[in-house]
Image (cartoon, rainbow, N blue to C red):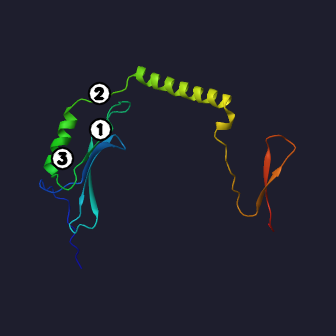
Amino acid sequence: MDFLVPKFRRDGNAKIDSLYYGVAPGGMTVTAIAKPSLDGSRKEVTRSYESGGLAPGQGGRIGILILGGMETTLDEVEYILEAKKQKPFVPRRSSGEIASMCYELLERRNSLIRHYQKNPSEAPKKTARLYLPVRVRQVKTPVPGLTLYQRNGTH
């Protein structure tokens, strides 16, 4: 008995849901095209791998995701992808911006600590619970901070 399995054929007018172009393991790049199947019951993803991705230690853009929906064709999505590839990647964050964000987080944390020290009734309550397995109980020891778990049963 022979089975006919259709292989991927590029159709420029095919309706595309999304296209992803990004870094793959092994220093390669991957292009993943997601489109509805022929019967429309599921999504089909076709991946193609290319060598010559990012060199080790090289930073920058790791991926491009283009959401096309049901109205965008493969040609249009590939045109958008090529335009994105041609545009040089410019990181939006500088080292000064990252340092200022860290400083703002530190100041926010310290101000919350000062606020809760002045108003201890507003502080969030710690509700950490320990769920032990069946037939296991916690045993206290004379050493502060040390607890043991004892198994109950016939073992």
Residue hosting label 2: 90
Identify the residue at horizontal 67%, vertical 28% (top origin). 118
- Between 66 and 59, the residue placed more toward the observer is 66
Q: Are marks 2 and 1 in contact (CB under 8 Å)?
A: no
The dot on residue 53 is: 1
Task: State the residue at coordinates (79%, 50%).
Answer: 148
Q: Nearer the viewer, residue 94 or 119?
A: 119
Estimate the spatial distance between the alpha carbons at disc 2 and disc 1, rounded to whole Å.
Answer: 18 Å
- Mark toward the viewer: 3 or 1: 3
Percent from the top left, x then y, of residue 69?
Answer: 22, 53
Quote the CA–CA distance across marks 3 and 2.
22 Å
Question: What is the CA distance from the residue labelled 3 to the residue labelled 1?
Answer: 20 Å
Secondary structure of the residue carrying tag 3 is helix
Instruction: Say which quarter of the image contains residue 155.
Output: bottom right
Q: Tell me the quadrant of the picture where the N terminus can be found.
A: bottom left
- Dot 1 falls on a residue whose secondary structure is loop
Q: Amino acid at mark 1?
A: Gly
Q: Choose the circle earlier in sequence order: 3 or 2.
A: 3
Question: What residue lies at 30% left-to-right and 42% top-to-bottom?
Answer: 22
Q: Is residue 76 above or below residue 62?
A: below
